[in-house]
Amino acid sequence: MEITNPTNQEVLVRASCFLQERQPSFSKEDCDWYARQLSLYLNQWTMTDLLIHLNQPAKIGMWEQIEPLLIRLSNFEPLQYITKQAEFYGREFIVSPDTLIPRPETEELVEKIIAFLSEQSSGKVLEIGVGTGCIIHTLALECPDFFYQGVDISEGALEVAKKNQEKYELENVSLYLSDVFQEVSPQKFVCMISNPPYIDVSEKNVMDESVLRFEPEVALFAEDEGLAIYRNIAQNLENYLLEEGQAFFEIGFQQGKAVQQLFEYYCPNREVSVHKDLSGNDRMIIVGRRK
């Protein structure tokens, strides 16, 4: 029986039970967490706000607002696409179905780039495949003395990246449409970055259903066993990277050796190293000056 004038706590309990009934593969802990996140989103609250208002009456029409979102969650749609936001490096970024959802392991790549840029005085930085812009905008905020250029092949992704640029009022970032280097004018960068599509189409059958159904294929899959974009970048790297510059790439956990060999072949005078993430998987390639 529906409760008249339910409290926020009662809405949370009902939402969690509703979600678990519709999607039994979700644990009770997951359902409780999703219910809280949707409450925060719909009320525009912090967790502190929720705790303060927990036993107070929910706003009128709250269930009618939360129910369709719970149904979307039960169909495996990622929460970030429902709330249109995702956290990355301690900041909220706008996301859309035109962009991948930022992953925590990418923050490890950003840490390494920040460490490198902190040793440089200034220069130009290029990101190929900006998506939401979470990498380039984070760098622009953390290392503001550089000028950043970001490109993407997707107009939809570029729109989102520009919204995030406006959100953080970044005047040292320039974003434009380009298929890898196609529209990038001849120039040299102190730092280059890419987290490109790197999944081979043959791996679709082992991927998470929510990723396959909702995240953009153009940002996930690449030809040549997932190496096509890396090859394109490797072939042109020396035309764009300063001698003392470094290039940083995120890779699939099984691609370390293959991507390393690609860059060693096309950039024989560079040092190419593979770096693991906190889970112990190959996750990053750094191309730099040979020591």
Image: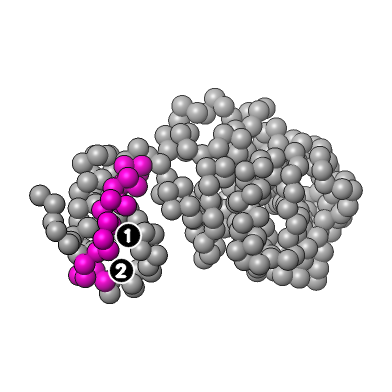
Q: Looking at this view, name the residue that lies furthest to the front.
A: 60
Q: Amino acid at mark 2?
A: Leu
Name the residue: 30% across, 68% down. 50
**For residue 138, side relative to residue 192 (left or right):** left
Residue 146 x/y as whole percent: 77, 66
Residue 174 x/y as whole percent: 75, 57
Name the residue: 66% across, 48% down. 158
Q: Amino acid at mark 1?
A: Ser
Name the residue: 71% across, 36% down. 229
Q: Are marks 1 and 2 in contact (CB under 8 Å)?
A: yes
**What's the CA distance linking mark 1 and mark 2?**
8 Å
Residue 227 falls within the magenta-colored stretch: no
Task: Please report the bounds of the magenta region as a residue range.
Answer: 53-73
Mark 1, residue position: 39
- Of residues 159 and 287, the one drawn nearer to the viewer in this rendering: 159
**For residue 144, side relative to residue 13 (left or right):** right
Name the residue: 78% across, 63% down. 147
Residue 54 falls within the magenta-colored stretch: yes
- Of residues 152 and 68, the one drawn nearer to the viewer in this rendering: 68
